[in-house]
Image: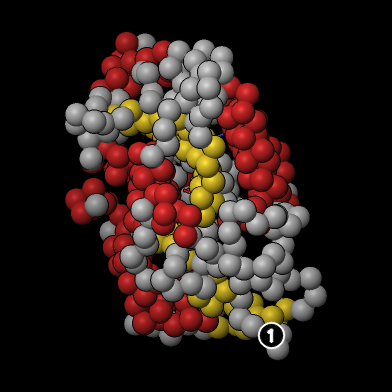
């Protein structure tokens, strides 16, 4: 109704001269919350959409939503597969950009919930792109792909032009499919597309299903953590990237994304298609035991560690990443090392779970 439109319009209001209006999908998610907040804070118009899926604890998503609303960002409760909802949103606001972060995330979850990945990461993506294609003024699209598209046992450090190996999970395969689909919409309909291959993103308001988060919980509660080690070879390592650095990369992607060249589904000229690695160049890659030591330090507690040697079909690669393309094209330069980033996370964790009712005063 009118009330809904009023909220959407007010949230989309641009408060600085060269501002943009952005639809952020997955806005109640970890990365979405931070990106929406950063855009709103600098005076852009921002409207969020999120279906509040129950992959992880609903209370964290609700609190993120309250945080955004306190900053004037309205989150529409809905699914990106809902054509009518998307049409209504685009009728209400002529978005210049779409920051598409909604997805079914998680790797192991895909074993028992395969259709959820198809629903959100494939069908939902197509529905959203169809809306962008048909819009009177086509928005430029920036979306979250994933470092997992490089596939199993690929040779690190990964560069954007490296060929991919077979995906290790259904999650990874839907992200890879997403790259094909977005590329097709770029070629056929002149949509400006930027795909961001995030590596492991961490920080305050993060995802409880991720290892740094569950380790923090276990260490602080005195329960054991399981650390996997590839026998006689190496400790498994990852490229961790702090949320504030990722947000800068997302914002720079929006600002450099150029124009879509089509309108109302017609192609006119050629719009950019870009892919960037967004990882860390400072402390990558970091082994899991090294991460545990930092967490122990920040919490002032010792971890109870069960080290499990794994053999057989494991991924030996060190998934670290070459970010020189993003450095050159986006001016992307991560500045937070793992030690200070994890300290900030732990500080947030202790505060949030210590007194969740006070949440809006400090963040
Ligand atoms: P998240 O789960 O916290 O956020 C995703 C949000 O999307 C959730 O709030 C969820 O409710 C919403 N959503 C899911 N399906 C939807 C649908 N069909 N319609 C509307 N909303 C829907 O995850 P995140 O870590 O913030 O990830 C954001 C994006 O970045 C995702 O696309 C993810 O695949 C990608 N990514 C994240 C990481 C990481 O380390 N966090 C790494 C690589 C890629």
Q: Residue at x 54, y 78 (%)?
A: 287
Q: Where does the image place residue 89, in percent across and percent down from the top left?
A: 42, 19
Looking at the image, the residue that sits furthest to the bottom is 232
Q: Where does the image place residue 332, in percent across and percent down from the top left?
A: 38, 55
As displayed, is residue 91 above or below residue 231?
above
Q: Is disc 1 surrounded by few (<14), some (14 to 19) or many (20+) residues within 10 Å?
A: few
Q: Residue at x 48, y 22 (%)?
A: 261
Q: Where does the image place residue 281, in percent across and percent down from the top left?
A: 44, 68
Is residue 264 shown to the viewer in this render?
Answer: yes
The scheme the figure's colours follow is secondary structure
Q: Nearer the viewer, residue 149 or 170?
A: 149
Q: Residue at x 53, y 22 (%)?
A: 269
Q: Nearer the viewer, residue 263 or 52?
A: 263
Looking at the rendered image, the quarter that the N terminus falls into is top left
Q: Residue at x 65, y 30 (%)?
A: 184
Looking at the image, the residue that sits furthest to the front is 269
Q: Nearer the viewer, residue 12 or 155?
A: 155
Q: Quadrant of residue 45?
A: top left
Residue position marked by numbered label 1 in the rendering: 233
As displayed, is residue 189 above or below residue 357?
above
Distance from mark 1 CB to nearest ligand 1 atom below 8 Å: no
Q: Where does the image place residue 57, in percent across and percent down from the top left?
A: 48, 50
Q: Is residue 8 left or right of residue 25?
A: left
Question: Helix or strand or loop: what does disc 1 sit on?
Answer: loop
Looking at the image, the residue that sits furthest to the right is 312
Number of labels in the image equals: 1
Is residue 218 shown to the viewer in this render?
Answer: no
As displayed, is residue 296 above or below residue 159?
below
Q: Is residue 199 left or right of residue 24?
A: right
């Amino acid at each position: 109704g009118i009330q809904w439109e009023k909220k959407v319009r007010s949230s989309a209001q641009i408060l600085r001269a060269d501002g943009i209006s952005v639809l952020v999908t997955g806005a109640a998610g970890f990365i979405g919350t931070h990106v929406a907040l950063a855009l709103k804070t600098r005076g852009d118009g921002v409207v969020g959409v999120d279906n509040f899926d129950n992959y992880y604890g609903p209370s964290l998503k609700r609190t993120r939503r309250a945080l955004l609303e306190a900053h004037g960002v309205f989150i529409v409760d809905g699914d990106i597969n809902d054509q009518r909802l998307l049409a209504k949103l685009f009728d209400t606001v002529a978005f210049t950009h779409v920051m598409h972060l909604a997805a079914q995330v998680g790797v192991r979850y895909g074993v028992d919930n395969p259709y959820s990945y198809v629903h959100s990461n494939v069908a939902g993506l197509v529905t959203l792109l169809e809306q962008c294609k048909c819009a009177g003024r086509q928005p430029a699209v920036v979306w979250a792909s994933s470092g997992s598209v490089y596939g199993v046992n690929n040779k690190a450090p990964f560069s954007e032009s490296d060929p991919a190996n077979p995906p290790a999970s259904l999650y990874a395969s839907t992200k890879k499919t997403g790259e094909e689909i977005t590329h097709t919409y770029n070629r056929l309909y002149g949509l400006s597309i930027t795909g961001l291959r995030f590596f492991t993103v961490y920080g305050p308001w993060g995802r409880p299903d991720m290892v740094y988060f569950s380790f923090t919980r276990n260490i602080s509660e005195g329960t054991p953590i399981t650390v996997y080690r590839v026998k006689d070879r190496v400790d498994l390592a990852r490229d961790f990237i702090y949320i504030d650095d990722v947000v800068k990369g997302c914002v720079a992607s929006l600002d450099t994304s150029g124009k879509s060249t089509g309108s109302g589904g017609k192609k006119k000229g050629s719009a950019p298609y870009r892919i960037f690695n967004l990882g860390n160049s400072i402390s990558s890659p970091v082994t899991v035991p090294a991460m545990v030591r930092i967490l122990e330090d920040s919490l002032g507690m010792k971890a109870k560690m069960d080290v499990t040697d794994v053999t057989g079909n494991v991924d030996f690669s060190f998934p670290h990443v070459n970010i020189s393309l993003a450095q050159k094209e986006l001016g992307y330069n991560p500045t937070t090392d793992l030690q200070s980033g994890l300290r900030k996370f732990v500080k947030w964790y202790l505060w949030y779970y210590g007194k969740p009712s006070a949440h809006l005063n400090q963040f």
